[in-house]
Image (cartoon, helix red, strand yellow):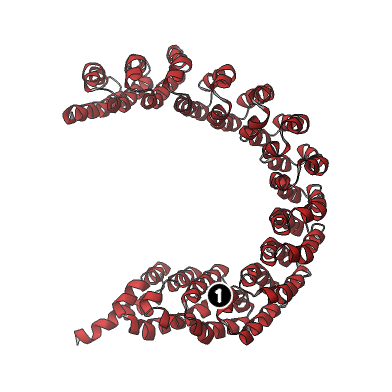
Amino acid sequence: MAMIEEPLYPIALLIDELKNDNIQLRLNSIHRLSTIARALGEERTRKELIPFLSENNDDDDEVLLAMAEELGVFLPYVGGVQHANVLLRPLETLCTVEETRVRDKAVASLCRIGDQMREHDVVDYFIPMMKRLAAGEWFTARVSACGLFHVAYPSALEALKMELRVIYSQLCQDDMPMVRRSAATNLRKFASTVEAVHLKTDIMSIFKNLMQDDQDSVRLLAVEGCAALGKLLGPQDSVAHILPVMVNFSQDKSWRVRYMVANELYELCEAVGPQPTRSELVPAYVHLLRDNEAEVRIAAARKVTGFCRILNPEITIQQILPCVKELSTDSSQHVRSALASVIMGMAPVLGKDATIEQLLPIFLSLLKDEFPDVRLNVISKLDQVNQVIGIDLLSQSLLPAIVELAEDRHWRVRLAIIEYIPLLASQLGVRFFDDKLGALCMQWLKDKVYSIRDAAANNVRRLAEEFGPEWAMEHIVPQVLDMINNPHYLYRMTVLHVISLLAPVMGSDITCSKLLPVVIGSSKDRVPNIRFNAAKVLQSIIPLVDRSVVEKTIRPCLVELNEDPDVDVRFFGGQALQSSDQVMLMS
């Protein structure tokens, strides 16, 4: 009897757990569906497990979400693609629930399964299911249906394809805005599967209907697909059908639509070609750069470099640059910050003379901006300008801004500029760094804020990696080691931190001759915090030096620290001593 009942155990256990009040138990059972399916076998999974899941009316969204995800990878457990249709029913049910995440996951799983189904199965099972959803009484079903057309359409026969195009057109005119939004979002995917002859007629008719929608949330989603549609249509048809719509919507009454146009305009330029871009899209883009809403100006400003690359320098200087000058003094700091993040890329487009004459004044005004984010965005992209105008001219304008940022009263601003120093060093070269920035790096090591001192220590290590140990030995190490005599113990602690970071970069010889003696001296400091930090640094140095150095220099020092009157010093000294003993044994 037990042998007969045993195969029923997995499904019985699943039923019990899915009816349990504890949501975690129900979730766990869903995540184990593949294990249960393997235990049941393919046939019983199709005949028992899948029907049970189809009828499961769990009302918890997390459980339903997990089920939608699991079913998407369930094909191997039901017998492969020839039985894929059995998975459609539970996923169809999940496509109708109220929770958006569950529906989206169910649609994604259906698309995954549909892509693997045989063509005649798509026609016999997938398309009827999709049509049921599209005709669903509740809007959630119709929303989900919009995301399935691009999977079903290629497998349909010509008459059925015409019916699907009609159904999609009806969804685009649905009474519920949520359905129209879904149709607008998925139009790009559907259009990519439609034949060219119907693309110019049926799809463009659908597109124009969406563009005339009274809901701005629908129009902006339609705008989002303009560039993709343009690439499908080709330059000539894009100019005829897409370009007028985009130009019109660059002055839409809704700022959200204009924002989306500003985001998509650059991509559309690639679809329509250079001539229509200059004649039609440049005026529209200039209008967006001068929009009343800051959000629209931000979106347009972020595309300015990409847009200028398409145009010739003359048009850029005549039409785009005046707008850029206005944006550099915009009332919104976020607009100026967006411009600062891309304006450096205009230098290679304009060339050296135009950059010095036209762009450099804008660049200097942004470097003097009252908001640090604007200045930092400029500094982070300096290499693009350096390549065009040269280091000498750049350094004359750069240094005052860096010094000002380095001494900003907000420690987070100082922290941000420190993180850019290695980048500047690599961009501008060792000579510029030695002349202009070396003193700043030492200054940061003595900052009152720990986070600044910590970042400055890491900065020193990265500079040593960038310029090499010899340079660091000449320009950094002597100044750092001099700080060990500072009367404030926190600065002496910073020296130990820098040594621990520099030792792996500098190599064994410099570490033993220059760095190690300072650490040994610090182990006798009057402040216990210095002594136990010295023990930690010694522990980090042990793997980097020869055994003889460990035996003759490091170990005797650690023995003393292990007998220190302070309990913390003894603890860290003991830890380091154990490390030295292990090294001695291994060697």
The x and y percentages for residue 424 are 57, 29
The x and y percentages for residue 180 are 69, 72
Q: Is residue 363 above or below residue 134?
A: above
Q: Quadrant of the N terminus?
A: bottom left
Q: Nearer the viewer, residue 448 or 471?
A: 471
Q: Is residue 96 visible?
A: no
Write the residue at 80% across / 63% down.
244
Q: In the image, what residue type sits under mark 1?
A: Val
Q: Quadrant of the C terminus?
A: top left
Q: How many marks?
A: 1
Q: Nearer the viewer, residue 483 or 385?
A: 385
Q: Is residue 586 above or below residue 335?
A: above
The x and y percentages for residue 468 are 44, 23
Q: Is residue 289 left or right of residue 514?
A: right
Q: Is residue 83 left or right of residue 175?
A: left
Disc 1 is placed on an element classified as helix
Write the residue at 52% across / 80% down.
92
**Mark 1 highlights which residue?**
151
